[in-house]
Image (cartoon, rainbow, N blue to C red):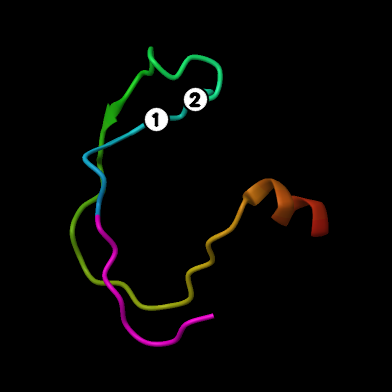
Amino acid sequence: MEEGAFAIELAETWSDDQWDIDQENRALEDQIISEGVAEGIIIGCNFWNLLQVL
């Protein structure tokens, strides 16, 4: 675990499709996140594994 400030780079596009089924034919959406400043705790993980322990 790291402590301290860090920058998060925004992706130009995102997808919510099953990328492992048809990698060549994906539906990419433009990013909709606004720039800004945030403070708090961020958790990065495989959410399927996280759900297994809840």
Tell me residue 3's x, y (percent).
44, 87
Q: Quadrant of the N terminus?
A: bottom right
Residue at position x 71%, y 56% from top?
Answer: 50
Residue 25 visible in the current orientation: yes
Residue 54 visible in the current orientation: no
Residue 38 sits in quarter: bottom left
- Could you tell whether 8 is left or right of 45 in the image? left
Q: Is residue 3 magenta?
A: yes
Tell me residue 18's x, y (percent).
53, 23
Q: Quadrant of the C terminus?
A: bottom right
Q: Residue furthest right?
A: 53
Q: Nearer the viewer, residue 42 or 38?
A: 42
Q: What element carries label 1?
A: loop
Separation (CA) of disc 2 from disc 1: 8 Å
- Crowd rating for badge 2 (residues with CA inside 10 Å; few <14, some 14–19, many 20+): few
Q: Is mark 2 on a helix, strand or loop?
A: loop
Tell me residue 5's x, y (percent).
32, 82
Tell me residue 13's x, y (percent).
27, 35
Residue type indicated by callout 1: Ser
Residue type indicated by callout 2: Trp
Q: Is residue 29 above or below residue 6?
A: above
Instruction: Write down the residue under mark 1.
Output: 15
Residue at position x 47%, y 82% from top?
Answer: 2
What segment is highlighted magenta in the picture?
Answer: 1-9
Q: Which mark is residue 19?
A: 2
Q: Is residue 19 above or below residue 42?
A: above
Q: Residue furthest front?
A: 24
- Crowd rating for badge 1 (residues with CA inside 10 Å; few <14, some 14–19, many 20+): few
* Majority SS type along the magenta span: loop
